[in-house]
Image (tube, rainbow, N blue to C red):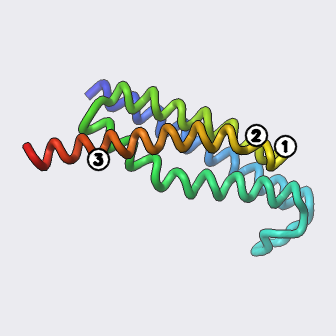
Amino acid sequence: METIAYPGGVTLLALLLYLLTMMNVGRNRVKHSIEAPATTGNIDFECAYRAQMNTLEHMVFFLPSMWLFAYTMSAEWACWIGLMWVAGRIQYAIGYITDPKKRAPGVIIGMIAQVTLFIGAAIGISKLLLG
């Protein structure tokens, strides 16, 4: 049961990252007087908003893949690959917020991590099904 703490910790880090991007959107919304439900009107706000929303979009794929990988393959490896995803998403968000052209390295790191987790989870589930 202890090893479940590893992907659990990564899940909390991913959620913290999402919370911080969400707070940054709120801060930018107030700073630039962007009234809800508007999502446009200032480039700094729009970059913060897209960094948050893109992180959310990727979390939908990342989190189940990481947990399935942890369950069927290795919780420790899921943790390390998950930490790589979080690091990539941090790099992505900072890059996007400072200059949207700098977001690519973070996207690539995150995609490598989440696709690795997905493939590993698919292999693990296949092994369980084929018994």
Distance from label 2 to label 1 (Cα)? Answer: 6 Å
Find disc 1 in the rendering and name its residue. Answer: 98
Give the residue drawn at x 37%, y 27%. 77
- Is label 3 in a helix, a strand or a loop? helix
User: Residue 76 at x, y = what percent?
Assistant: 36, 25
- 98 displayed left or right of 11: right
Residues marked 2 and 1 touching at CB (< 8 Å) = yes
Label 2 CA crowd tier, 10 Å (few <14, some 14–19, many 20+)? some
Q: Nearer the viewer, mark 2 or mark 3?
A: 3
Residue pictured at 48% horizontal, 55% vertical:
60
The amino acid pointed to by label 3 is: Ala
Name the side, left or right, on which 120 lies relative to 59: left
Residue 1, percent across and down? 25, 28
Residue reaching furthest left? 131
Q: Residue at image x 84%, y 55%?
A: 28
Q: Is residue 24 left or right of residue 116?
A: right
- Disc 3 marks which residue? 122
Q: Amino acid at mark 1?
A: Thr
Q: Earlier in the sequence, mark 3 or mark 1?
A: 1
| Residue at the image position 46 percent from the left and 31 percent from the top | 81
Q: Quadrant of residue 3?
A: top left
Give x and y (percent) for residue 51. 71, 52
- The residue that label 2 is drawn on is 94
Q: Amino acid at mark 2?
A: Ile
Residues at discs 2 and 3 in contact (Cβ within 8 Å): no
